Amino acid sequence: MNLTIRARNLSKWFGQVVALNDLTFELAAPLIGLLGQNGAGKSTLLKLLVGLLAPSRGEVSLDGRHPRHDRRLRRQLGYSPELDRFYEDLSPAEFLLVMTRLHGLPAEAARTATQETLERVGLSAHAQRPIRTLSHGMRQRLKVAQALAHRPRLLVLDEPLAGLDPLGRIELNRLFREEAAAGCTIWISSHVLHELQALTDTVLLLHRGRLLAEGSVRRIRDLIDAHPHRVAVGCARPRELGAELARLDHVRRIEFTAKGLVVETERADECYDALGRLGAEGTLGIHSLDALDDNLEAVFRYLTQ
Amino acid sequence: MNPTGESNPPPSSALAAALVARLFFRTGLPRRRLLWLSVLLLLPLLAALAYRLSGEGEGSAWFRETAVPMFVEFFALGLSLYLGVASLADEIEDGTIVFLFCRPVPRGLVLLAKVVAVIGVAGIGLSASLLLVFLGCHLPDGDALWAAAPLLVRVLGVLWLEVLVYTGLFSLAGSLLRRPMLLSIIFGFGWEVTASHLPGDLPRLTLMFYLRSLLGLSPGAENMLSSLVPPLPPADAATALAVLLSAAGVFISLAAWIIGRREYRL
């Protein structure tokens, strides 16, 4: 059964800066997407959910319990932060072992959980390397691994797909769906609607600390699709990729950049599908996808007018 | 895999503290930092050997009058400052502390485990260094060695106490201040060392005065100002111990309390 997450007049400010402003919601879905631009308050909300921050006003509760000081509740939470920070000299296996033991798993169970989780996130082959030698994608997977190795009831993931290659996205999305199917409640933040759409139909849309919309991805997507969408693609062979993309009728424009190219499309779904397919083929060396914010900004402007 | 229920309780405090301390040994003491600390702690031995080889005076006198104050006022203070501040501030600045704070472990316990780990590292390092210096100053004269052994034991006790109290103080600085290192250096060497040498009552306001008192060292006795202001006699051992242990308790409790409530930019 999924956790019921309730916020009542939830506000958080840091000095003069209001990060979250009077949020009220109640959700019990298996997978919940948190959508908003950088600075919208997504990370703050997620930190409040796992008790890393205390509300300035109002309250947030998980099944009626408050995460900040309830150790037994925190035992059931897993959190993957946005920032790319690690104990760089540890190996992934050492890191996961300590983290799972700190979550209360006995030594043998922690070792088993570590091995299984490394396998699930595709890091078994790199289990003994120092973390500092891992690629960005591997580090993202490791962040997710440390959040789910102890099998939490609530998994809170702050931008877990940022900067991942298409294959990495597919694999992590599959993992998230498996966890949700096994009864884990997952909150996942992104500034890219299409990332969330692949996982869930339930989203919260945050804008400048306010809850702008709550509900179906489809409705929000329709709004977004009315605006052209820009995707920055990091790749080794941008000219060849550009030639492939130029054949698609929904692609309006292609700009070449130092790291690859930026493609502007009228139909983001189809564009992501095409990039995923080309990425999976592996011939063009696509290593990262980043949606640029300008189309989301247009939707926010529309919704707030 | 099914999500966990409440069947597995959070780790016991002792286990959690041991895990955090082990993590500190593994990550807070990288090879380069350990190398510098080892070099630093070998310096007094080199100084002692140089003194002995120069043949200018007695090794036991040099140990008593130069090495002991050097350990108390520079090495123990400096090591406690460096490791005490770094134990917490480094992780807060690096952002890795988030991995500990999101576990079901009280934040105060995280701090306590780090303080204990720092005391262990600094205490063992200082003890080993002092022992080597002691041997370097007294060998091969067995009689002088045994005669000075009680002083060695007393100095070792004072060094461990000093590490406890200053690690507490500087981890409090690490939990409280955004850039704690510079202020800690100013406070440690600027206030604690300098003020503890002044004549008059001012040294009573430093921890160093009580540490020096335990070794029978009087502030200001060797100072030019002592002809104008009478030097303060050392505090008695019971008072010094009470002040130092209370201060350590207050610093560590306060640091644990602050870290449990303060919100860091993680």
Image (cartoon, helix red, strand yellow):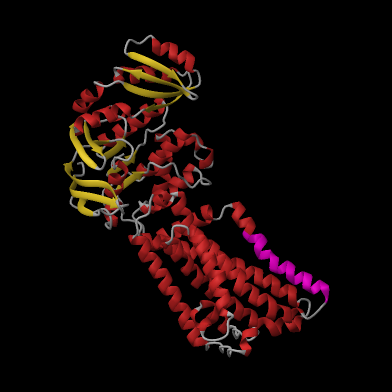
Q: Position of residue A48 (x, y in %)?
A: 28, 49
Residue B50 magenta-drawn?
Answer: yes
Instruction: Name the one closer to the observer, A112 or A182.
Output: A182
What is the magenta range?
B37-55
Q: Position of residue A280 (x, y in %)?
A: 42, 20
A240 up-or-down from B164: above or below: above
In-front residue for pair B8/A285? A285
Residue A57 shows in the view:
yes
Answer yes or no: is residue B7 visible. no
Can you say which quadrant of the picture contains the N terminus of chain B?
top left
> Looking at the image, which residue is at 38% across and 19% down?
A263
Give the quadrant of residue A251: top left
Picture residue at 65% right of the left edge, 63% below the top: B40
> Outermost residue, front direction?
B228
Q: Is residue A302 left or right of residue A251?
A: left
In the image, residue A113 lies at what x, y percent?
39, 43
Q: How many numbered discs?
A: 0
